[in-house]
Amino acid sequence: MSSTNISRTAKRISDLVNLKKRGAAVTCRQTFEVIPVDFHHRENPFQAHIFLCRFEGEVDGEAYSFRKCYARGCPNNLCPHVSQAVMIANRYLQRDHILLKKAGIDVEERLFSLEDMLVKFDGYQEEHDPTLTIDDYIHMAKEGAKVSVAIDLEYVPAVEHFANYHNSQTFLNIDFVVESLGKKHNFQRCFACYQTEREEEEKAGQVEVANARLKELYEEFDAASITYEKKFFK
C-alpha cells in the first residue's frame, strides 16, 4: 500500500489504545530493526546501534505505520553499552505489549534478541551503571525516595546505515540527568525522528508526537512527586 494511503490517525502506541477504546477495529504487527547509526552529537561524533520497532496494521480498515525507538547502544561511554541497550529496549517494549493487550489489541509478544551482536563485545566489563530506566525512578519516587530530573532536549542529526543505502535522520532526543539516593544517573531516549531532507514536511508532525510522549511522562512525574522542569520541543 502506498504511503499516501497510510492512516495519519495512529502515530503512537497511545493512539492505538485510544482508538481501540473508542470502538475501532485495530490490528497490530511489529517488525524489529537494529540499525547502525552515525550520530553527530555536539563535538562528539560516534556510531551506535538504535533499536527500532515498526508497528503496522489497520484501524477500521485504514492502514497505519509508525516506528518507535526503544534504546541506543554503543561500545563507549557516550550511551549505554549494547548489552544494556538490549535489556532497556525489551523492558520498554514489554510495557507497550501490556498496554496493547489491556486495550484488547492482539500483538505477538516478541522481544529484541541480539546474541550474535553481543559476541562482538566480549571484552565488556560489568562495571557500568545498572540497567535502570525512567520507570524505575518513577517507582522509587512513589515509594518515597526523593527524585529530581534535569531534562535537556536536543535535535541530533544522524545517518542510518542500511544494507544498500544510507538515510539521514534527525532524532528528537531527551537527555535525562536523574539524582536520587545520593547518586546521579545520565541516560538518553529518543522520542521521535524525521528524515532530515524532509524536515519541512515531517518535523512539525514528529515534534507533536514527541511532545505528546513528554506530556504523558510529565504526568507520571507529577503523580510520583518528582522534581523537574517541564520542557517541550519547538
Image (cartoon, rainbow, N blue to C red):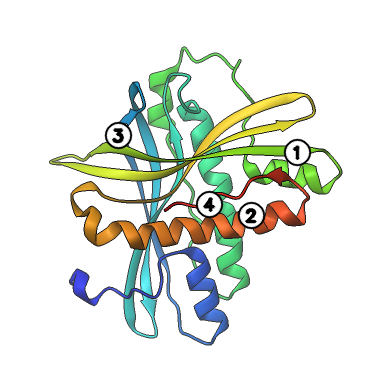
Comparing 37 with 53, the one in front is 37
Comparing 233 with 108, the one in front is 233
Q: Which mark is nearer the camera, 3 or 1? A: 1
Rendered image quadrant of residue 5: bottom left
> In this figure, which residue is indicated by the disc labeled 4?
93
> In this figure, which residue is indicated by the disc labeled 2?
218
Q: Position of residue 190 (x, y in %)?
A: 45, 45
Q: How far separated are the C-alphas under marks 2 and 3?
A: 29 Å
Q: Is residue 1 something one can see in this rendering?
A: no
Q: Earlier in the sequence, mark 2 or mark 3?
A: 3
Q: Earlier in the sequence, mark 3 or mark 4?
A: 3
Q: Which mark is nearer the camera, 2 or 3? A: 2
Q: How far separated are the C-alphas under marks 3 and 4?
A: 21 Å
Q: Residues within 10 Å of mark 2 (few under 14, many from 20)?
A: some
SS at mark 2?
helix
Q: Is residue 37 left or right of residue 3?
A: right
Query: Mark 3: which amino acid?
Result: Val
Query: Mark 4: which amino acid?
Result: Leu
